Amino acid sequence: MTKQSLTLYLAAPRGFCAGVDRAIKIVEMALEKWGAPVYVRHEIVHNKFVVDGLRDKGAVFVEELLECPDDRPVIFSAHGVPKAVPAAAAKREMIYVDATCPLVSKVHIEAQRHSDNGLQMIMIGHEGHPETIGTMGQLPDGEVLLVETVEDVATVEVRDPERLAFVTQTTLSVDDTIDIVKALQERFPGIVGPHKEDICYATTNRQEAVKAIAPKCDAIMVVGAPNSSNSKRLVEVGARAGCDYAQLVQRATDIDWRALNGIKSIGITAGASAPEVLINEVIDAFKDRYDTTVEIVETAVENVEFKVPRVLREPA
Ligand code: 0O3
Ligand code: SF4
Protein backbone atom coordinates (compact mmCIF):
# COMPACT_ATOMS: atom_id res chain seq x y z
CA MET A 1 0.00 0.00 0.00
CA THR A 2 1.37 3.45 -0.82
CA LYS A 3 1.72 5.80 2.09
CA GLN A 4 -0.32 9.02 2.29
CA SER A 5 1.81 12.15 2.21
CA LEU A 6 2.12 14.24 5.33
CA THR A 7 3.88 17.51 6.15
CA LEU A 8 5.31 17.40 9.65
CA TYR A 9 5.90 20.84 11.16
CA LEU A 10 8.45 20.57 13.93
CA ALA A 11 8.34 23.48 16.37
CA ALA A 12 11.63 24.96 17.53
CA PRO A 13 12.42 25.52 20.32
CA ARG A 14 10.81 22.45 21.89
CA GLY A 15 11.75 20.02 24.66
CA PHE A 16 14.37 20.41 27.38
CA CYS A 17 15.08 23.87 28.80
CA ALA A 18 18.21 24.88 30.68
CA GLY A 19 16.59 24.38 34.09
CA VAL A 20 15.51 20.83 33.32
CA ASP A 21 18.87 19.96 31.82
CA ARG A 22 20.60 21.23 34.97
CA ALA A 23 18.22 19.43 37.35
CA ILE A 24 18.75 16.05 35.67
CA LYS A 25 22.52 16.61 35.62
CA ILE A 26 22.39 17.36 39.35
CA VAL A 27 20.83 13.96 40.11
CA GLU A 28 23.28 12.16 37.81
CA MET A 29 26.29 13.94 39.31
CA ALA A 30 25.04 13.35 42.86
CA LEU A 31 24.80 9.62 42.11
CA GLU A 32 28.36 9.69 40.76
CA LYS A 33 29.67 11.63 43.73
CA TRP A 34 27.89 9.92 46.62
CA GLY A 35 26.77 6.62 45.09
CA ALA A 36 23.25 5.16 45.35
CA PRO A 37 20.84 5.70 46.86
CA VAL A 38 20.37 9.44 46.39
CA TYR A 39 16.92 10.65 47.42
CA VAL A 40 14.95 13.10 45.26
CA ARG A 41 12.08 15.05 46.78
CA HIS A 42 9.29 15.07 44.14
CA GLU A 43 9.80 14.08 40.47
CA ILE A 44 12.98 15.95 39.51
CA VAL A 45 11.06 17.13 36.44
CA HIS A 46 7.56 16.06 35.43
CA ASN A 47 8.43 13.19 33.13
CA LYS A 48 8.00 9.50 33.90
CA PHE A 49 10.66 8.41 31.40
CA VAL A 50 13.26 10.72 32.99
CA VAL A 51 12.27 9.63 36.51
CA ASP A 52 12.34 5.91 35.61
CA GLY A 53 15.78 6.33 34.02
CA LEU A 54 17.20 7.98 37.15
CA ARG A 55 15.52 5.41 39.39
CA ASP A 56 17.34 2.69 37.43
CA LYS A 57 20.61 4.46 38.27
CA GLY A 58 19.83 4.51 42.00
CA ALA A 59 17.70 7.58 42.66
CA VAL A 60 14.83 7.13 45.12
CA PHE A 61 11.86 9.44 44.55
CA VAL A 62 9.78 10.56 47.54
CA GLU A 63 7.22 13.31 48.08
CA GLU A 64 8.31 14.47 51.53
CA LEU A 65 11.63 15.02 53.27
CA LEU A 66 10.34 12.91 56.18
CA GLU A 67 10.60 9.86 53.91
CA CYS A 68 14.38 10.33 53.55
CA PRO A 69 16.96 8.93 55.96
CA ASP A 70 19.31 11.44 57.65
CA ASP A 71 22.43 9.83 56.23
CA ARG A 72 21.75 9.95 52.48
CA PRO A 73 21.89 13.00 50.19
CA VAL A 74 18.62 14.52 49.02
CA ILE A 75 17.92 16.65 45.94
CA PHE A 76 15.04 19.14 45.71
CA SER A 77 13.21 19.14 42.37
CA ALA A 78 13.47 21.81 39.64
CA HIS A 79 10.09 23.27 40.65
CA GLY A 80 11.37 24.68 43.95
CA VAL A 81 10.50 24.04 47.60
CA PRO A 82 9.06 26.04 50.49
CA LYS A 83 11.73 27.56 52.77
CA ALA A 84 10.80 25.08 55.50
CA VAL A 85 12.21 22.18 53.43
CA PRO A 86 15.92 23.14 53.29
CA ALA A 87 15.58 24.40 56.85
CA ALA A 88 14.40 20.96 57.99
CA ALA A 89 17.19 19.25 56.03
CA ALA A 90 19.79 21.54 57.62
CA LYS A 91 18.37 20.83 61.08
CA ARG A 92 18.77 17.10 60.44
CA GLU A 93 22.33 17.80 59.18
CA MET A 94 21.51 16.15 55.85
CA ILE A 95 23.48 16.67 52.66
CA TYR A 96 21.05 18.39 50.30
CA VAL A 97 21.35 19.87 46.82
CA ASP A 98 18.75 22.28 45.54
CA ALA A 99 17.91 21.63 41.87
CA THR A 100 15.37 24.49 41.79
CA CYS A 101 15.74 26.22 38.41
CA PRO A 102 17.59 29.53 38.86
CA LEU A 103 14.66 31.26 37.13
CA VAL A 104 12.30 29.91 39.81
CA SER A 105 14.74 30.92 42.56
CA LYS A 106 14.73 34.42 41.07
CA VAL A 107 10.96 34.58 41.69
CA HIS A 108 11.49 33.37 45.27
CA ILE A 109 13.96 36.20 45.83
CA GLU A 110 11.54 38.75 44.32
CA ALA A 111 8.75 37.60 46.66
CA GLN A 112 11.05 37.87 49.68
CA ARG A 113 12.27 41.34 48.63
CA HIS A 114 8.74 42.72 48.21
CA SER A 115 7.71 41.25 51.53
CA ASP A 116 10.79 42.80 53.22
CA ASN A 117 9.57 46.13 51.82
CA GLY A 118 6.25 45.61 53.60
CA LEU A 119 4.20 44.57 50.58
CA GLN A 120 1.66 41.74 50.65
CA MET A 121 2.20 39.30 47.79
CA ILE A 122 -0.21 37.99 45.19
CA MET A 123 0.90 34.94 43.24
CA ILE A 124 -0.59 34.13 39.84
CA GLY A 125 -0.33 30.35 39.57
CA HIS A 126 -2.07 26.99 39.69
CA GLU A 127 -3.26 25.79 43.08
CA GLY A 128 -1.49 22.68 44.33
CA HIS A 129 1.32 22.80 41.73
CA PRO A 130 4.72 22.24 43.38
CA GLU A 131 6.14 25.50 41.99
CA THR A 132 3.22 27.47 43.44
CA ILE A 133 3.61 25.68 46.78
CA GLY A 134 7.35 26.42 46.72
CA THR A 135 7.01 30.09 45.85
CA MET A 136 4.18 30.70 48.31
CA GLY A 137 6.23 28.84 50.91
CA GLN A 138 8.99 31.46 50.75
CA LEU A 139 6.89 33.58 53.09
CA PRO A 140 4.84 32.78 56.17
CA ASP A 141 1.33 31.35 55.72
CA GLY A 142 -1.18 33.96 54.58
CA GLU A 143 1.47 36.40 53.26
CA VAL A 144 1.00 35.21 49.66
CA LEU A 145 -2.49 35.20 48.16
CA LEU A 146 -3.12 32.95 45.16
CA VAL A 147 -5.07 34.02 42.08
CA GLU A 148 -5.62 31.59 39.22
CA THR A 149 -8.04 33.49 36.98
CA VAL A 150 -9.35 36.96 36.10
CA GLU A 151 -12.43 36.10 38.18
CA ASP A 152 -10.25 35.45 41.25
CA VAL A 153 -8.85 38.98 40.96
CA ALA A 154 -12.30 40.44 41.58
CA THR A 155 -12.74 38.59 44.87
CA VAL A 156 -9.25 38.41 46.40
CA GLU A 157 -9.22 40.06 49.84
CA VAL A 158 -6.04 42.03 50.51
CA ARG A 159 -4.71 43.72 53.65
CA ASP A 160 -4.01 47.08 52.05
CA PRO A 161 -4.70 47.72 48.33
CA GLU A 162 -1.89 50.33 48.30
CA ARG A 163 0.80 47.90 49.49
CA LEU A 164 0.79 44.96 47.10
CA ALA A 165 3.12 43.17 44.72
CA PHE A 166 2.69 40.17 42.44
CA VAL A 167 4.77 37.29 41.15
CA THR A 168 3.83 34.47 38.78
CA GLN A 169 4.53 30.80 38.14
CA THR A 170 7.15 30.46 35.37
CA THR A 171 5.16 28.08 33.16
CA LEU A 172 1.83 29.87 32.69
CA SER A 173 0.09 30.73 29.44
CA VAL A 174 1.55 34.09 28.37
CA ASP A 175 -1.79 35.26 26.95
CA ASP A 176 -3.92 34.26 29.96
CA THR A 177 -1.42 35.89 32.29
CA ILE A 178 -1.53 39.22 30.42
CA ASP A 179 -5.27 39.34 31.16
CA ILE A 180 -4.82 38.47 34.84
CA VAL A 181 -2.07 41.08 35.29
CA LYS A 182 -4.28 43.67 33.57
CA ALA A 183 -7.14 42.84 35.92
CA LEU A 184 -4.82 43.17 38.93
CA GLN A 185 -3.52 46.54 37.72
CA GLU A 186 -7.06 47.79 37.14
CA ARG A 187 -8.25 46.78 40.60
CA PHE A 188 -5.00 47.73 42.39
CA PRO A 189 -3.36 50.54 40.37
CA GLY A 190 -0.38 50.75 42.76
CA ILE A 191 0.53 47.05 42.57
CA VAL A 192 4.24 46.41 42.06
CA GLY A 193 5.47 43.59 39.82
CA PRO A 194 8.02 42.41 37.30
CA HIS A 195 8.28 44.22 33.95
CA LYS A 196 5.70 41.81 32.42
CA GLU A 197 5.40 38.62 34.50
CA ASP A 198 7.79 35.88 35.67
CA ILE A 199 7.09 33.44 32.82
CA CYS A 200 10.49 32.15 31.72
CA TYR A 201 12.20 32.35 28.34
CA ALA A 202 11.64 28.62 27.66
CA THR A 203 7.89 28.75 28.33
CA THR A 204 7.53 31.89 26.21
CA ASN A 205 9.56 30.51 23.31
CA ARG A 206 7.75 27.14 23.22
CA GLN A 207 4.36 28.89 23.20
CA GLU A 208 5.48 31.24 20.39
CA ALA A 209 6.71 28.29 18.30
CA VAL A 210 3.48 26.31 18.71
CA LYS A 211 1.51 29.43 17.73
CA ALA A 212 3.55 29.65 14.53
CA ILE A 213 2.77 26.07 13.45
CA ALA A 214 -0.82 25.78 14.71
CA PRO A 215 -2.62 27.48 11.79
CA LYS A 216 -0.89 25.14 9.29
CA CYS A 217 -1.61 21.92 11.19
CA ASP A 218 -4.58 19.54 11.00
CA ALA A 219 -3.42 18.16 14.34
CA ILE A 220 -0.73 18.85 16.94
CA MET A 221 1.03 16.39 19.22
CA VAL A 222 2.63 17.86 22.33
CA VAL A 223 5.09 15.42 23.87
CA GLY A 224 4.85 15.77 27.63
CA ALA A 225 3.39 14.42 30.85
CA PRO A 226 -0.14 14.99 32.18
CA ASN A 227 1.29 16.61 35.34
CA SER A 228 3.55 18.97 33.37
CA SER A 229 2.09 22.47 33.56
CA ASN A 230 4.15 23.93 30.71
CA SER A 231 3.29 20.99 28.42
CA LYS A 232 -0.44 21.31 29.10
CA ARG A 233 -0.22 25.03 28.30
CA LEU A 234 1.26 24.13 24.88
CA VAL A 235 -1.81 22.02 24.09
CA GLU A 236 -4.12 24.93 25.00
CA VAL A 237 -2.04 27.49 23.08
CA GLY A 238 -1.96 25.26 19.98
CA ALA A 239 -5.72 24.75 20.08
CA ARG A 240 -6.38 28.45 20.61
CA ALA A 241 -4.04 29.42 17.79
CA GLY A 242 -6.19 27.56 15.29
CA CYS A 243 -5.49 23.83 15.40
CA ASP A 244 -8.66 21.79 15.91
CA TYR A 245 -7.01 18.73 17.40
CA ALA A 246 -4.17 19.28 19.88
CA GLN A 247 -3.21 16.37 22.13
CA LEU A 248 -0.73 15.64 24.88
CA VAL A 249 1.16 12.37 24.35
CA GLN A 250 3.75 10.88 26.66
CA ARG A 251 5.20 8.75 23.88
CA ALA A 252 4.33 7.19 20.49
CA THR A 253 2.06 4.50 21.96
CA ASP A 254 -0.33 7.25 23.17
CA ILE A 255 -1.08 8.49 19.65
CA ASP A 256 -4.71 7.88 18.69
CA TRP A 257 -4.20 7.05 15.00
CA ARG A 258 -7.92 6.70 14.31
CA ALA A 259 -8.52 10.30 15.38
CA LEU A 260 -5.83 11.39 12.91
CA ASN A 261 -7.47 9.73 9.93
CA GLY A 262 -7.23 11.89 6.79
CA ILE A 263 -4.77 14.50 8.11
CA LYS A 264 -2.41 16.16 5.64
CA SER A 265 -0.27 17.98 8.18
CA ILE A 266 0.86 17.37 11.74
CA GLY A 267 2.60 19.67 14.19
CA ILE A 268 4.98 18.35 16.81
CA THR A 269 6.33 20.11 19.85
CA ALA A 270 7.33 19.10 23.38
CA GLY A 271 7.22 20.49 26.89
CA ALA A 272 10.37 21.59 28.71
CA SER A 273 10.59 18.28 30.59
CA ALA A 274 10.17 15.95 27.58
CA PRO A 275 13.39 14.22 26.47
CA GLU A 276 14.55 14.26 22.86
CA VAL A 277 14.34 10.43 22.57
CA LEU A 278 10.59 10.57 23.13
CA ILE A 279 10.18 13.42 20.63
CA ASN A 280 12.11 11.37 18.07
CA GLU A 281 10.02 8.30 18.85
CA VAL A 282 6.85 10.29 18.02
CA ILE A 283 8.38 11.73 14.83
CA ASP A 284 9.47 8.23 13.74
CA ALA A 285 5.98 6.85 14.35
CA PHE A 286 4.64 9.38 11.81
CA LYS A 287 7.46 8.62 9.38
CA ASP A 288 6.58 4.91 9.59
CA ARG A 289 2.94 5.48 8.66
CA TYR A 290 3.15 8.39 6.23
CA ASP A 291 5.32 9.61 3.41
CA THR A 292 6.56 12.43 5.61
CA THR A 293 8.21 15.74 4.75
CA VAL A 294 9.65 17.44 7.82
CA GLU A 295 9.67 21.24 8.02
CA ILE A 296 11.34 22.84 11.02
CA VAL A 297 9.67 26.08 12.09
CA GLU A 298 12.14 27.98 14.25
CA THR A 299 10.88 31.10 16.01
CA ALA A 300 13.77 31.58 18.47
CA VAL A 301 17.28 30.33 19.11
CA GLU A 302 18.15 29.43 22.70
CA ASN A 303 21.60 29.38 24.22
CA VAL A 304 20.85 29.48 27.94
CA GLU A 305 22.88 27.20 30.20
CA PHE A 306 22.95 26.96 33.98
CA LYS A 307 25.87 25.66 36.03
CA VAL A 308 25.30 22.89 38.56
CA PRO A 309 25.87 23.83 42.23
CA ARG A 310 29.50 24.08 43.33
CA VAL A 311 29.30 21.07 45.68
CA LEU A 312 28.91 18.84 42.60
CA ARG A 313 31.78 20.46 40.72
CA GLU A 314 34.19 19.74 43.57
CA PRO A 315 35.84 16.33 43.92
CA ALA A 316 34.31 13.99 46.54
O1 0O3 B 1 6.14 23.29 36.12
P1 0O3 B 1 5.88 22.17 35.15
O2 0O3 B 1 4.74 21.31 35.64
O3 0O3 B 1 5.74 22.63 33.78
O4 0O3 B 1 7.21 21.27 35.29
P2 0O3 B 1 7.97 20.32 34.30
O5 0O3 B 1 7.08 19.69 33.33
O6 0O3 B 1 8.79 19.42 35.18
O7 0O3 B 1 8.94 21.25 33.47
C1 0O3 B 1 9.99 21.95 34.08
C2 0O3 B 1 9.55 23.29 34.56
C3 0O3 B 1 9.93 23.61 35.95
C4 0O3 B 1 10.77 22.90 36.65
C5 0O3 B 1 9.34 24.77 36.62
O8 0O3 B 1 9.51 25.91 35.89
FE1 SF4 C 1 13.54 27.02 34.46
FE2 SF4 C 1 11.79 27.85 32.67
FE3 SF4 C 1 12.76 25.43 32.50
FE4 SF4 C 1 11.09 26.06 34.46
S1 SF4 C 1 10.61 25.98 32.29
S2 SF4 C 1 12.94 24.86 34.62
S3 SF4 C 1 11.71 28.19 34.86
S4 SF4 C 1 13.94 27.36 32.30
Image (cartoon, rainbow, N blue to C red):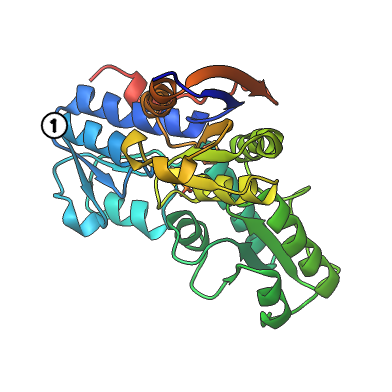
Does the residue tagged 1 have its C-beta within 8 Å of any atom of ligand 1? no
Residue at 71% x, 39% y: name it.
Answer: 215
Which of 5 and 187 lies nearest the eye of the viewer? 5
Furthest-front residue in view? 1
- In which quadrant is the N terminus drawn? top left
Density class for disc 1 (Cα within 10 Å; few <14, some 14-19, many ≥20) is some
Residue at 62% x, 22% y: name it.
Answer: 302
Image-quadrant location for residue 91: bottom left
User: Callout 1, which amino acid?
Assistant: Ala
The correct choice, above or below, for 163 with respect to 278 in the image is: below
Q: Percent x, y for residue 231?
A: 50, 45
Q: Which residue is mark 1?
A: 36
**SS class of the residue under badge 1?**
loop
Residue 146 is at least partly visible in this image? yes
220 lies left or right of 57: right
Residue at 41% x, 44% y: name it.
Answer: 258
Q: Percent x, y for residue 42?
A: 31, 50
The correct choice, above or below, for 165 with respect to 77 in the image is: below
Which of 85 and 257 lies nearest the eye of the viewer? 257
Which of 161 and 23 lies nearest the eye of the viewer? 23
Q: Percent x, y for residue 45?
A: 38, 41
Q: Percent x, y for residue 270?
A: 50, 35
Residue 109 is at least partly visible in this image? no
Residue at 40% x, 40% y: name it.
Answer: 257
Image-quadrant location for residue 122: bottom right
- In which quadrant is the C terminus drawn? top left
88 lies left or right of 168: left
Q: How many labels sit on residues?
A: 1
